Image (spheres, grey):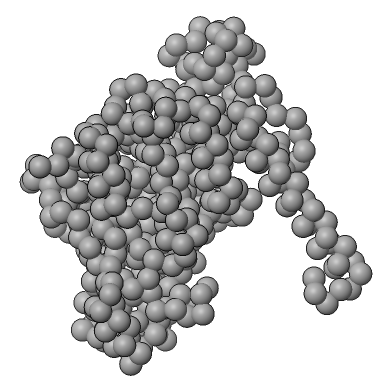
Amino acid sequence: MSKLVPPHGGKGLIIRLLEGDARAEELKKAESLKKVPVSSREKGDLIMIGTGGFSPLDGFMTRADWKGVCESFLLADGTFWPVPVTFSVTKEDAAEIKEGDEIALVDPENNNEVVATMKVTEKWEKTEADKKWECEMVYKGQGEDSADDKFWKIALEDHPGVKMVMAEKDVCLAGPVNVLSEGEFPTKFKGVYMRPAEMRAELEKRGWKEVAALQLRNPMHRSHEFLAKIAIEVCDGVVIHSLIGKLKPGDIPAEVRVKCIDTLIEHYFVKENVIQAGYPLDMRYAGPREALLHATFRQNYGISRMIIGRDHAGVGDFYGLFEAQEIFDRIPYPEEPGKALICTPLKIDWTFYCYKCDGMASLRTCPHSKEDRVILSGTKLRKALSEGQPIPDHFGREEVLAILREYYENLTEKVEIKMQKAASGDPMK
């Protein structure tokens, strides 16, 4: 019997990914179905639904599910869920689709590859007012700086998650899906991309029971390393679980981040106590709500503790530094078996390198002043590297910084070449 936490929802892993003959038959059927495009975010959601990462979801949400999630963190059946998972289409496409129809979902970024089929059980309109309400419920922080007027004044320009929701089409389709493609992830990130069942098998092979996950969308700096090592001290092991889907412009590509993590594990970790893995979602930048989502789907991977540090899944100054920790104390915990979130937060204070402590520390352990501390953040690191600024001592491991410097140098060269071609009127620019 497995020692790992059970999948979320009390129904085991809900697998909607077809393979082999079943996939071939579904692809043949899809040839005659109406084709509807999916966004990058929806494609990532489909893969997570297909592989069981979003259990107990078997498809896209109904209006009742969407409303319950936004309003009270609960699906219509009372199961905890923190962030909407919806699929939107144009009014023109929706007019050609009836409830009960089957449709094919295609990826316009990959030659309209059929990525899934869907049985449409509900069509529902998502008005501008609905979208705005969703943004206020899901993306707006709790602090006084998140007052409605200030939030909307800057959100439409500066919050990628809000812009993503407001750009959705006007009609949502709900219903179960059969997923037919995992995109490029199994090949491009071979050995890193793992389905929940594969992760669970690896954790059981290692004999782990209490497992922590470190969420990453930036290259690992010393603070991330410190967080992971704290988790290793109190759990059987840690999964460094990177987002390998799409980020906002300016963020560092997943393949570069994977290389950095490999280097860190090679030189600074006991390898038996750490796993590097990746998952295929796009970032929503929903701050506290996304921290809950990260814990919810990590439970499906067999993970019992979610490391939650400073400004988890945040963007800009939209969220308080520890709102993503505090929200775990406000969510409902349904009493019905399987419907509550079991994966619990591992709450860690603001961490940094302290010259006087001569090592990594946190606000709970370091008595010294801010002048003695090297404040570590992915945003600061990206800014310094992209502008060719010196990196403060103890900000990151030199082996990792070498990889990042090489990436930014190559990036600068490509930009300069493109600008030169543009200036010369080169038609191949």
Q: Residue furthest right?
A: 424
Question: Where is residue 24 drawn, in percent x and y?
Answer: 30, 81
Q: Residue furthest left?
A: 336
Question: Where is residue 298 drawn, in percent x and y?
Answer: 30, 45
Q: Is residue 82 left or right of residue 127?
A: left
Badge count: 0
Question: Where is residue 61 drawn, in percent x and y?
Answer: 27, 65
The image shows residue 155, relative to residue 347, as above or below, that is: below
Q: Residue at x 25, y 47 (%)?
A: 201
Q: Residue at x 86, y 67 (%)?
A: 421
Q: State which quadrant residue 66 falls in.
A: bottom left
Q: Nearer the viewer, residue 193 or 158?
A: 193
Quadrant containing the N terminus in the rendered view: top left
Q: Is residue 336 left or right of residue 162?
A: left
Q: Residue at x 77, y 57 (%)?
A: 414
The image shows residue 364, relative to residue 10, as above or below, that is: above
Q: Nearer the viewer, residue 212 or 75?
A: 212
Q: Residue furthest bottom?
A: 32
Residue 82 in view here? no
Q: Nearer the viewer, residue 195 or 416?
A: 195
Q: Residue at x 49, y 10 (%)?
A: 366
The image shows residue 194, relative to residue 418, as above or below, that is: above
Question: Where is residue 319 drawn, in percent x and y?
Answer: 47, 38
Residue 358 in view here? yes
